[in-house]
């Protein structure tokens, strides 16, 4: 525990049932050293869920293999991160019109709830 500087979750969040996501993000927090970062890369539509079209098509495809999943938006990923204890999430586009990355940091000082 607390061994890593970076945890990368690429194309995982959209493939995991909704009820398992909080535990997965909490596990990532426990694995990181203080100040370490979690990078989440996945197909994500905008927070408004109005597109982009290619990301929406990929998200729709995911429902065939993961009907228990969530519609991924940067806001949903940021909320999962913040709930787990991460701070300062930042979203950037990765593959234009399809994927985004959200990066957040484990605080240097962690509360005793972990």
Image (spheres, grey):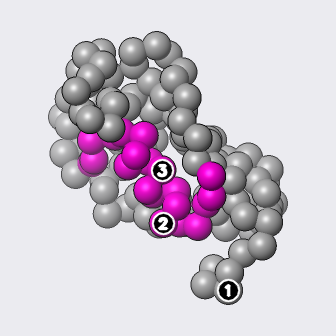
The residue identified by callout 3 is 78
Residue 76 sits above or below residue 21 on the image: above
Magenta segment includes 84: yes
Disc sitting over residue 98 in the figure: none
Give the image location of residue 55, x and y in percent: 32, 22
Is any atom of residue 76 visible in this view? yes
Q: Is residue 29 left or right of residue 4?
A: left
For label 3, the crowd category at 10 Å Cα-Cα, with few meaning under 14, some 14 to 19 and many 20 or more, is many
Dot 1 or dot 2: first in sequence order is 2
Residue 11 sits above or below residue 6 on the image: above
Dot 3 or dot 2: first in sequence order is 3
Give the image location of residue 59, x and y in percent: 27, 30
Residue 114 sits above or below residue 58 on the image: below
Is any atom of residue 61 visible in this view? no
Task: Give the residue drawn at x 27%, y 41%.
Answer: 71
Q: Which residues are magenta?
A: 69-88
Judging depth in this view, the residue of 71 and 47 nearest the camera is: 47
The residue identified by callout 2 is 83
Which structural element holds mark 2? helix
How far apart are the two marked residues, 1 and 2, measured between alpha carbons?
15 Å
For residue 106, which quarter of the picture? Answer: bottom right
Task: Give the residue drawn at x 55%, y 29%.
Answer: 92
Which structural element holds mark 1? loop
Check the picture and name the quadrant holding the C terminus.
bottom right
The residue identified by callout 1 is 112
Which structural element holds mark 3? helix
Judging depth in this view, the residue of 24 and 94 nearest the camera is: 94
């Amino acid at each position: 525990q607390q061994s890593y500087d970076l945890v990368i979750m690429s194309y995982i969040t959209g493939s995991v049932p909704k009820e398992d996501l909080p535990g997965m993000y909490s596990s990532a927090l426990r694995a990181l050293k203080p100040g370490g970062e979690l990078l989440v890369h996945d197909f994500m539509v905008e927070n408004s869920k109005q597109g982009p079209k290619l990301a929406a098509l990929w998200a729709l495809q995911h429902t065939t293999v993961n009907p228990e999943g969530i519609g991924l938006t940067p806001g949903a990923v940021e909320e999962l991160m913040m709930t787990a204890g991460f701070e300062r999430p930042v979203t950037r586009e990765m593959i234009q019109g399809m994927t985004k990355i959200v990066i957040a940091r484990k605080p240097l000082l962690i509360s005793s709830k972990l």
